[in-house]
């Protein structure tokens, strides 16, 4: 069953109610006990079945996910491979300290990375014997159901992976420690003294300095922006000596992006699934035109927001939008770039430069969790419970 009108709440609610088994608190508690009795080999075998299901059924699943979220199939295939790779690398503790673990986990998936943002954190929590409850995103409501099929046939206990429609407070065990994971600043689950909130997301910043390989930097940023604009790349800061050349290269590369039906393997940019992001993007572009700060745009194509560049020296915006609309700003010193980074407090920061000292300076003077040198970092989607708080990409 494919529901075309993804913006109608009544249709979404009816679909979830009829197709998703609603787990009761006692079932989730029982799953927690059952998971703790499973060996590492048993859990590893279940994970292999989950990942293999996604690979084997990708041709049937991905077009449906693409039509719901607007993300092209070619990038959804990469998400499955990212999930496969992360799952294979994930260590399963043979004898975890159960007394220190939450009794349940709640995942708020990111509709721009609809598969990886569910699979990877779910495998992480289950590897620590913590049942998972997913709160469907309204723009990707179909995805958790498709993923549920992978988990339900994996051999994991009933209730290990569940989907909760609406307020989760009534469906989770009362008084138990709960860990909530999101990369998109989702609303918090409830006021629970045992709750832990992780990885709440935020903006991203890229800095292209005068000693960088400008052609490489432009190509890498375009590839990353188009494939993963799920990370809110708010601003690109470019040294004034290379600003014009960088801008021209970006225009050339962005002009060649193929837009269209996300189910087509040749499509690089699909439609905007979020009505809120669509309206915000159109308003920002209209304001940029009024202020004569719109440097590049082919204009919207229906509900496809084509890549657009706005002069950050003339205008700025604070809206969190997940469409390829970016501010490009010049700077003549690294202190100016650091000042901009300090104001934004980016979760992701990419530096394109051949000067390793600048990279070390960014590490020590920013609080970004993901920092990339001459590459745009990936979000790992692995909660930072037992891992280092910062990932360095070289």
Image (cartoon, grey):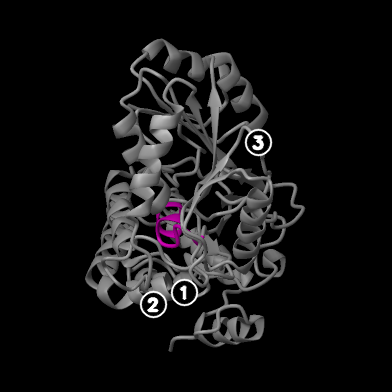
Q: Residue at x 54, y 14 (%)?
A: 333
Q: Residue at x 67, y 66 (%)?
A: 168
Label 3, on which residue? 314
The mark found on residue 64 in the picture is: 2
The mark found on residue 68 in the picture is: 1
| Nearer to me, 230 or 367 | 230
Discs 1/3, front: 3
Number of labels in the image equals 3
The image quadrant of residue 247 is top left
Residue 127 at least partly seen: no
Q: Residues within 10 Å of mark 1 (few under 14, many from 20)?
A: many
Instruction: Look at the numbered disc 2 and give the secondary structure of its residue.
Output: helix
Residue 393: x percent and y percent? 36, 30
Residue 365: x percent and y percent? 56, 17
Residue 330 at least partly seen: yes
Instruction: Look at the numbered disc 1 and give the secondary structure of its residue.
Output: helix
Sequence-wise, the earlier of marks 3 and 2 is 2
Q: Do residues under tags 1 and 2 come within 8 Å of each other at their CB atoms?
A: yes
Residue 253: in magenta span: no
Residue 114: in magenta span: yes
Specify start and end residues of the magenta stretch as a single range: 111-121
Up/down of 159 relative to 329, above or below: below
Up/down of 378 relative to 242, above or below: below
Task: From the viewer's perspective, tell me whether residue 181 is left or right of residue 150.
Answer: right
| Nearer to me, 141 or 289 | 289
Q: Residues within 10 Å of mark 2 (few under 14, many from 20)?
A: many
Gap between marks 1 and 3 measured at Cα:
36 Å
Q: Could you tell me which quadrant the N terminus lies in?
A: bottom left
Gap between marks 3 and 2 measured at Cα:
41 Å
Up/down of 296 relative to 139, above or below: above
Q: Residue at x 31, y 51 (%)?
A: 82
């Amino acid at each position: 069953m494919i529901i075309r009108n993804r913006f109608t709440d009544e249709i979404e609610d009816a679909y979830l109610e009829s197709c998703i088994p609603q787990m009761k608190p006692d079932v989730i508690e029982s799953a927690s006990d059952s998971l703790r009795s499973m060996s590492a080999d048993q859990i590893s075998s279940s994970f292999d079945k989950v990942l293999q299901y996604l690979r084997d059924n990708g041709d049937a699943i991905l077009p449906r996910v693409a039509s719901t979220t607007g993300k092209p199939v070619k990038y959804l295939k990469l998400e499955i491979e990212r999930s496969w790779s992360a799952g294979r690398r994930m260590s399963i503790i043979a004898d975890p300290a159960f007394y220190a673990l939450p009794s349940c986990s709640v995942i708020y998936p990111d509709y721009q990375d609809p598969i990886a943002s569910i699979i990877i954190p779910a495998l992480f929590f289950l590897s620590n014997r913590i049942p998972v409850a997913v709160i469907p995103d309204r723009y990707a409501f179909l995805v958790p159901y498709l993923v549920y099929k992978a988990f339900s046939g994996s051999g994991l206990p009933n209730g290990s992976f569940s989907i909760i429609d609406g307020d989760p407070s009534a469906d989770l065990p009362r008084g138990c420690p709960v860990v909530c994971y999101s990369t998109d600043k989702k609303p918090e689950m409830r006021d629970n003294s045992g709750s832990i909130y992780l990885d709440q997301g935020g903006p991203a910043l890229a800095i292209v300095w005068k000693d960088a390989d400008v052609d490489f930097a432009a190509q890498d940023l375009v590839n990353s922006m188009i494939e993963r604009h799920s990370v809110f790349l708010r601003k690109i800061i470019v040294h004034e000596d290379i600003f014009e050349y960088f801008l021209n290269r970006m225009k050339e590369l962005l002009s060649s992006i193929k837009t269209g039906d996300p189910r087509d393997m040749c499509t690089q940019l699909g439609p905007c699934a979020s009505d809120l992001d669509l309206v915000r993007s159109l308003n920002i572009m209209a304001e940029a035109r009024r202020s004569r700060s719109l440097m590049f745009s082919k204009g919207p194509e229906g509900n496809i927001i084509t890549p657009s560049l706005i002069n950050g020296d003339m205008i700025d915006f604070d809206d969190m939008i997940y469409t390829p609309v970016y501010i490009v700003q010049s700077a003549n010193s690294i202190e100016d770039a650091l000042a901009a980074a300090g104001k934004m407090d980016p979760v992701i920061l990419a530096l394109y430069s051949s000067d390793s000292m600048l990279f070390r300076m960014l590490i020590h003077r920013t609080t970004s969790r993901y920092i990339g040198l001459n590459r745009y970092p990936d979000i790992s989607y692995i909660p930072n419970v037992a891992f280092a708080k910062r990932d360095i990409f070289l």
